[in-house]
Image (spheres, grey):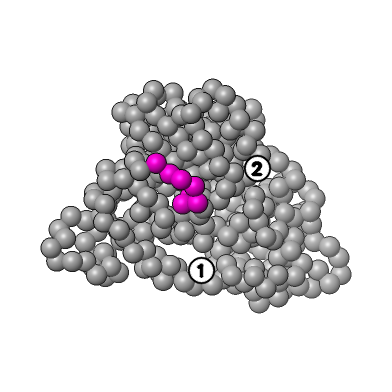
């Protein structure tokens, strides 16, 4: 998993937790939106401070069970919505929002859940649905044309052997059903591996991105958040792969740097205050100690920005910049 895979099977380690807390300062109170509630690791720590409130979202219906316990404990200081974070504006939100947090990817519980088929170490039918999905990885592998598979593997997985793998899938699926084990075997036969990573990592990432429409989710979530956060409020993202980090980096740099803003958003000459400030010029990554306790945290990257005024931001530039990735994501609409 991402943020919460632990080396000890029974433990849950929210990634970069101390860093997140030190940026949002919940000791001062305030209302925070946890866009990716998961097992409630961040939410719980925020709510330990009095005068805080958390409004949480998670697309996975299984998060509801944890949320019920939080509700019993924290009462009206906690609200949970089993929704995608792209729907953040579909509920009535308070006027003052001090922080919005995105801890992207999937949770320890999700990767251990065999029915979700997120891990290449499991057996069984391909799935990868996190919640509120239209298609599964099985649909993609069974039905998408080889040319589309190749594009998805190339752009969402940065897979150099995308053509060979797509062709092998196309050949094999005419003969037999390809399940998780079958796909892993097929990838292993198609690739020489010179890295420590499992050979199937990139293809599984690509399928997961498409099944869960992770590109449009992130772009919509960020785009809406920047106009929901209050003056002085903070948006934080914790990313785990280069595509999501690229989107967050571009977005945060654009809304907080004069040069970038002037290129994408025509900025009024009198408007000397930029909409956001970058909190950390350099990305924040886990310490060696954290990586030792929780090895999957090693790929985490934290970025954060602080709202500087209340001017509305036109976020069309973000959709335009990643138009190509959004188009590839739409290939699933053929199914
Ligand atoms: C890495 S986990 C979050 C872990 C959490 N910070 C914690 O400490 O327990 C990511 C969670 O985000 C959820 N998620 C991913 N994409 C989502 C989306 N677009 N909308 C809502 N929830 C999403 C997943 O279902 C998963 O539970």
Task: Report the residue that reaches farthest toward the left.
Answer: 270
Please give the name of the residue rendered at 57% of the width and 67% of the height, measured from the top-left corner.
Answer: 329
Look at the image and give the residue range highlighted in magenta: 88-94
Residue receiving disc 1: 325
Q: Position of residue 92 (x, y in %)?
A: 46, 45
Q: Nearer the viewer, residue 42 or 30?
A: 30
Q: Nearer the viewer, residue 116 or 31?
A: 31
Residue 63 colored magenta? no
Label 1 packing within 10 angstroms: few (<14), some (14-19), many (20+): some
User: In this rendering, which labeled residue sits more in front, label 2 or label 1?
Assistant: 2
| Disc ID at residue 89 | none
Residue receiving disc 2: 61
Q: Position of residue 154 (x, y in %)?
A: 57, 68
Q: Position of residue 311 (x, y in %)?
A: 26, 56
Residue 89 colored magenta? yes
Q: In the structure shown, which secondary structural element does the residue marked by tag 1 occupy? A: helix
């Amino acid at each position: 998993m991402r943020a919460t895979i632990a080396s000890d099977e029974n433990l849950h380690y929210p990634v970069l937790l101390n860093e997140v807390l030190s940026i949002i300062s919940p000791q001062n109170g305030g209302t925070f939106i946890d866009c990716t509630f998961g097992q409630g690791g961040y939410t719980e720590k925020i709510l330990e401070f009095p005068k805080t409130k958390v409004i949480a979202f998670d697309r996975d219906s299984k998060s509801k069970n944890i949320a019920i316990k939080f509700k019993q404990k924290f009462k009206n200081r906690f609200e949970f919505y089993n929704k995608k974070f792209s729907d953040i504006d579909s509920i009535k939100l308070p006027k003052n929002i001090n922080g919005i947090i995105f801890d992207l990817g999937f949770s320890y519980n999700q990767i251990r859940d065999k029915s979700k088929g997120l891990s290449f170490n499991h057996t069984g039918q391909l799935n990868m649905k996190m919640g509120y999905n239209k298609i599964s990885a099985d649909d993609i592998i069974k039905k998408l044309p080889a040319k589309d598979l190749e594009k998805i593997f190339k752009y969402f997985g940065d897979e150099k052997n995308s053509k060979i793998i797509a062709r092998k899938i196309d050949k094999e699926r005419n003969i037999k059903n390809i399940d998780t084990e079958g796909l892993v075997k097929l990838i292993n036969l198609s690739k020489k591996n010179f890295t420590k990573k499992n050979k199937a990592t990139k293809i599984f990432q690509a399928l997961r991105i498409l099944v869960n429409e992770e590109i449009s989710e992130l772009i919509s979530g960020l785009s809406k958040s920047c106009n929901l956060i209050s003056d002085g409020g903070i948006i934080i993202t914790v990313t785990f792969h280069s595509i999501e980090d690229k989107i967050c980096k571009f977005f945060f740099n654009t809304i907080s740097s004069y040069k970038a803003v002037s290129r994408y958003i025509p900025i009024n000459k009198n408007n000397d205050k930029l909409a956001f400030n970058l909190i950390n010029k350099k990305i924040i990554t886990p310490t060696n100690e954290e990586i030792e306790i929780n090895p999957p945290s090693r790929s985490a990257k934290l970025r954060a920005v602080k709202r500087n005024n209340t001017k509305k931001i036109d976020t069309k530039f973000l959709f335009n910049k990643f138009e190509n990735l959004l188009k590839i994501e739409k290939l699933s609409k053929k199914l």
